[in-house]
């Protein structure tokens, strides 16, 4: 049977309202909750200075994992070198955690003590 048969009139649908199954006894319209969707919390990935990791390696990490161009990557690396720490990027929680793991894995693999953390932005 076609769902839109002409002898069963349906209330007009307003845009954005969910279509609910009509059970014959009268349609129950659930009121929309005040649908406040909170924006996700953001986390900054912070790289720390040390005396051993080569500058070139840090620049490479910033280019490879944080999509920084050479000039920006060099600026961030120098900021970390001079100030002790620097923000590589700001991400949602899962993405930030993954970036930290990628950086630490790359550093470990290359034998460098580079440290990287995430913190609420
Ligand atoms: N301080 C390091 C050096 O002189 C360079 C460096 C920069 C290391 C940034 C880590 O996150 C870092 N070779």
Image: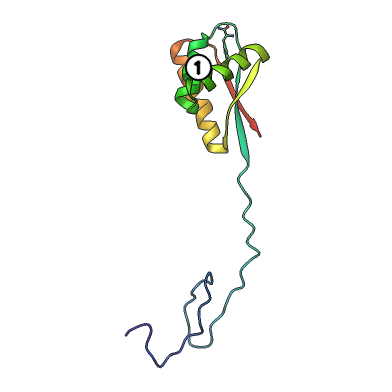
* Count of marks placed on residues: 1
Tell me what residue is drawn at x 52 percent, y 10 percent.
55
Kindly identify the residue that appears in the image at 51 percent across and 82 percent down: 12
**Does mark 1 have its CB less than 8 Å from ligand 1?**
no
Question: Who is closer to the viewer here, 50 or 83?
Answer: 83
Q: Which residue is mark 1?
A: 59
Q: Nearer the viewer, residue 22 or 54?
A: 54
What is the x, y in percent for residue 75? 57, 18
Q: How is the image coloured?
A: rainbow
Residue count near mark 1 (Cα–Cα under 10 Å), binned few <14, some 14–19, many ≥20: many
Image quadrant holding the N terminus, namely bottom left
User: Residue placed farthest to the left in the image?
Assistant: 1
Q: Where residue 53 sits in the image (x, y, percent)? A: 53, 9
Q: Nearer the viewer, residue 84 or 113?
A: 84
Q: Residue furthest bottom?
A: 7
**Residue at 62% over, 38% down:** 42
- The quarter of the rendered structure image containing the C terminus is top right
Residue with the most extreme top position: 52
- Up/down of 7 relative to 74, above or below: below
Name the element at disc 1. Answer: helix
Expressed as whole percent of the image width and height from the top left, the position of residue 71 reads: 51, 19
Up/down of 5 relative to 16, above or below: below
Which of the 4 image quadrants contains residue 114? top right
**In the image, ligand 1 is in what quadrant?**
top right
- Where residue 18 appears, as percent x and y from the top left, is 51, 71
- Left or right of 48, for residue 3: left
Q: Residue at x 38, y 84 (%)?
A: 4
């Amino acid at each position: 049977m076609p769902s839109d048969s002409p002898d069963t009139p349906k209330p007009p649908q307003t845009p954005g309202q969910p279509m609910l199954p009509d059970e014959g006894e009268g349609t129950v319209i659930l009121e929309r909750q005040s649908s406040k969707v909170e924006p996700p919390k953001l986390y900054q990935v912070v790289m720390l200075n040390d005396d051993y990791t080569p500058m070139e390696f840090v620049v490479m990490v910033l280019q490879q994992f944080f999509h920084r161009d050479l000039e920006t990557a060099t600026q961030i690396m120098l900021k970390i070198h001079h100030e002790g720490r620097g923000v590589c990027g700001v991400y949602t929680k899962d993405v930030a955690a993954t970036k930290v793991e990628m950086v630490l894995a790359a550093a470990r693999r290359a034998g460098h003590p580079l440290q990287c953390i995430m913190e609420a932005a």
